[in-house]
Image (spheres, grey):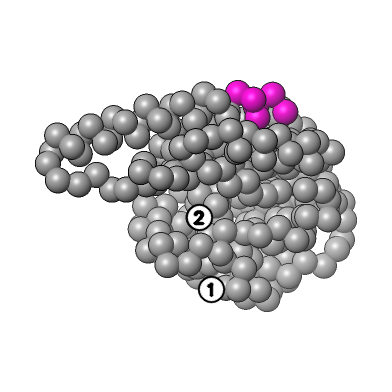
Amino acid sequence: MTESLVRQREVTLVDLVDRLLGGGVVISGDITLAVADVDLVQVSLRALIASVDTVDEAVR
Amino acid sequence: MIYVYAIGDGVSRARVVGLDGRAVERVTEGRLTAFVTRDMERPPEPTPATLGAHDEVVMSLMVDGAVLPMRFGTVLRDDADIRAVVRDRADELVQALDRVRGRVELGVRAVWRGNHAEPPAASGGDFLRAKLRRRAAARMVAAEVHPRLAQLATDARCSLLPRDDTPLAAAYLVDRVRCGEFEAHAAELAEEQPDAELVVSGPWPPYSFSEPTDA
């Protein structure tokens, strides 16, 4: 796992969902018009995860 | 509205393509830059494609300097609003950027093998016993894996049994140059676990290390 892997990595949907919807900088308060509704999204994407674990094809 | 991917302090002008193939632009406030797509008509739907696109943008930006990814789906009204956020939280953001500089996030997820994977069946008593057994086994996996991997990281997060099929989901902030060492160590540990397989993912932008002190 070296720098070259930065472009080569395999991204699985479950890891992607956990990080993008559970991590990152959160801007709270009225200034934010929208941020993904985590609970709602988790439910719909989990169903997807159950059927496909690798997101590569969907992404690229 | 304006979609925000990340905040960083890089100075590159590299062209990056964002959601819906739209341009990623820069909004600079002091020494910090927000990476955005302007004139979004609505917040993006979270799909594998949009999540992947957000992630790809942040990965590309990491080549030119430290960045803090935003939570997916962050949409503000306009430039003035994102400038205000960056200005108000400048000190905290600069500190977080310094913490992640030159580092990447590596994920380690454990998945059961063998009979822990089976859903508990039959009576309520069986159900509870299976649940307790799983929790004890998850604790054991975490105790053997997490401290040893955390030694190779500058920061770490660990969540025990976040889902029934997942005894452990952990994230490690690792110096780029130590990624190989980390992965080799994780592979060794994986062979020693009777109950679980370890899945290493990344390198990722520092999604799990972008907020100040949620440790």
Residue type at mark 2 is Val
The residue tagged with tag 2: helix, strand or loop? helix
Residue pictured at 66% horizontal, 60% vertical? A10
Residue at image mark 1 = B41
Dot 1: within a 10 Å radius of its alpha carbon, few (fewer than 14), some, or many (20 or more) residues?
few
**Residue B165: x and y, percent?**
39, 46
Q: Which residues are magenta?
A: B147-152
Taking A41 as reference, is B104 left or right? right
**Residue B65: x and y, percent?**
83, 46
Q: Is residue B139 above or below residue A44?
A: above
In magenta stretch: residue B33: no
Q: Is residue B174 above or below residue A38?
A: above
Residue pictured at 14% horizontal, 46% vertical? B122
Chain of the residue under the numbered disc 2 shown in the image: A
- Numbered circle sitting on residue A14: 2
Front residue of this view, candidates B135 and A40: B135
**Residue B61: x and y, percent?**
77, 55
Residue pictured at 56% horizontal, 55% vertical? A16
